Image: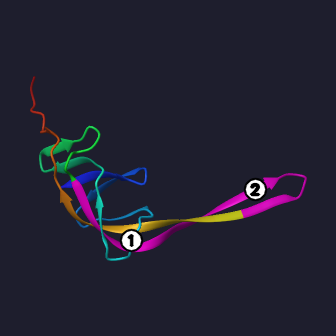
């Protein structure tokens, strides 16, 4: 079973037991978070697709820790005028561990059968 969720303007494919890094969320390590914007849920042969969300579906996750992404170097340079500037940026994320995927109501699409 897996789900497609949206948080922080990005979409993630999650399954139970997965660990993902999302944009910073409020809360302390150990707190539970509900990701309510579930776009799709797949359980075996059944696929529930939301328009745009699957109504009643939720993904429950636990905050593991706040983490930092890789350092990004920004280097500005203009030739012939001795202009050089170096900047850096490090994005902060929240690491989540997926605990439960709760199925909701939505349009169900099964496997297509071979034939006409």
Residue depicted at x 90% and y 54% = 81
Q: Secondary structure at mark 1?
A: loop
Q: Quadrant of the N terminus?
A: bottom left
Tell me where residue 96 appears, x and y as whole percent.
34, 67
From which residue to which does the magenta span run? Answer: 58-86
Tell me where residue 78 appears, x and y as whole percent.
83, 52
Mark 1 lies on residue: 27
Query: Does the CB distance between marks 1 and 2 fall below 8 Å?
Result: no
Of tags 1 and 2, which is closer to the observer?
1
Q: CA distance from mark 1 to mark 2?
A: 37 Å
Residue 30 appears left or right of 93:
left
Indicate whether 98 appears above or below 114.
Answer: below
Q: Nearer the viewer, residue 3 or 70?
A: 3
Q: Quadrant of the C terminus?
A: top left
Circle on res. 76? 2
Residue depicted at x 31% and y 73% = 31
Indicate whether 106 appears above or below 57.
Answer: above
Residue 15 appears left or right of 8:
left
Q: Tell me the crowding category of disc 2: few under 14, some 14 to 19, or many 20 or more residues within 10 angstroms, Cα based.
A: few
Residue depicted at x 16% and y 49% = 104
Q: How is the image coloured?
A: rainbow
Tell me where residue 23 appears, x and y as whole percent.
44, 60
Q: Secondary structure at mark 2?
A: strand
Q: Is residue 93 magenta?
A: no
Image quarter of residue 112: top left
**Circle nearer the N terminus (1, 2):** 1
């Amino acid at each position: 079973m897996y789900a497609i969720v949206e948080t922080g303007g990005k979409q993630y494919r999650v399954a139970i037991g997965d660990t993902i890094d999302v944009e910073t969320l409020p809360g302390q390590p150990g707190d539970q978070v509900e990701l309510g914007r579930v776009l799709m849920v797949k359980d075996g042969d059944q696929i529930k697709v939301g328009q745009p969300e699957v109504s009643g579906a939720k993904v429950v996750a636990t905050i593991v820790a706040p983490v930092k992404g890789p350092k990004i170097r920004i280097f500005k340079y203009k030739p012939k005028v001795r202009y050089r500037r170096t900047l850096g940026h490090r994005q902060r994320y929240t690491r989540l561990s997926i605990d439960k995927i709760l199925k909701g109501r939505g349009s169900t699409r099964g496997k297509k059968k071979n034939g006409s």
